[in-house]
């Protein structure tokens, strides 16, 4: 099934989640697209977590912990 997500490059948002710059937004959008191929259903909270990882605000270890806790739901 094809699912669309709202990406607004002018406002720098994905599903309403604000990004600091276009590069981080596009990197996150690419990560979301790749994961969606594997069945991932993005949520705003999940987008925040991915954004923070791509921006270097959280480490891979922290990302793994959040994923195991299903903090993205």
Image (cartoon, rainbow, N blue to C red):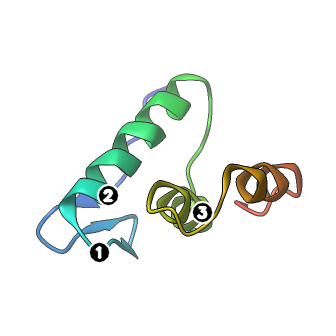
Q: Is residue 22 left or right of residue 55?
A: left
Q: Callout 3: helix, strand or loop?
A: helix
Q: Residue at x 54, y 32 (%)?
A: 35
Disc 3 versus disc 1: distance between alpha carbons? 14 Å
Residue 69 in which image quadrant: bottom right
Q: Which callout, 3 or 1, points at the residue further toward the start of the chain?
A: 1
Task: Kindly identify which numbered label has been placed on residue 20.
Answer: 1
Crowdedness near tag 2: few (<14), some (14–19) or many (≥20) residues, C-alpha within 10 Å: some
Residue 24 in which image quadrant: bottom left
- Residue 18: x %, y % from top left: 35, 76
The answer to whether 48 is drawn above or below residue 40 in the figure is below
Residue 19 in which image quadrant: bottom left
Task: Kindly identify which numbered label has been placed on residue 49.
Answer: 3
In this view, the residue in front, 41 or 21, is 21
Task: Kindly identify which numbered label has been placed on residue 24.
Answer: 2
Disc 1 versus disc 2: distance between alpha carbons? 7 Å
Q: Where does the C terminus fall, quadrant-wise? A: bottom right
- Point out the residue furthest to the left here: 10
Q: Is residue 61 left or right of residue 24?
A: right
Q: Verify CB contact (< 8 Å) between mark 3 and mark 2.
A: no
Disc 3 versus disc 2: distance between alpha carbons? 12 Å
Q: Verify CB contact (< 8 Å) between mark 1 and mark 2.
A: yes
Q: Residue at x 55, y 58 (%)?
A: 53
Q: Residue at x 34, y 46 (%)?
A: 27
Crowdedness near tag 1: few (<14), some (14–19) or many (≥20) residues, C-alpha within 10 Å: few
- Residue 31: x %, y % from top left: 45, 39
Crowdedness near tag 3: few (<14), some (14–19) or many (≥20) residues, C-alpha within 10 Å: many
- Residue 64: x %, y % from top left: 78, 48
Q: Callout 2: helix, strand or loop?
A: helix
In this view, the residue in front, 41 or 52, is 52
């Amino acid at each position: 099934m094809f699912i669309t997500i709202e990406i607004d490059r002018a406002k720098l948002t994905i599903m309403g989640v604000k990004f600091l710059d276009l590069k981080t937004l596009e990197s996150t959008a690419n990560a979301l697209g790749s994961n969606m191929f594997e069945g991932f259903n993005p949520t705003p909270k999940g987008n925040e977590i991915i954004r923070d990882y791509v921006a270097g605000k959280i480490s891979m270890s922290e990302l793994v912990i959040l994923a195991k806790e299903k903090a993205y739901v």
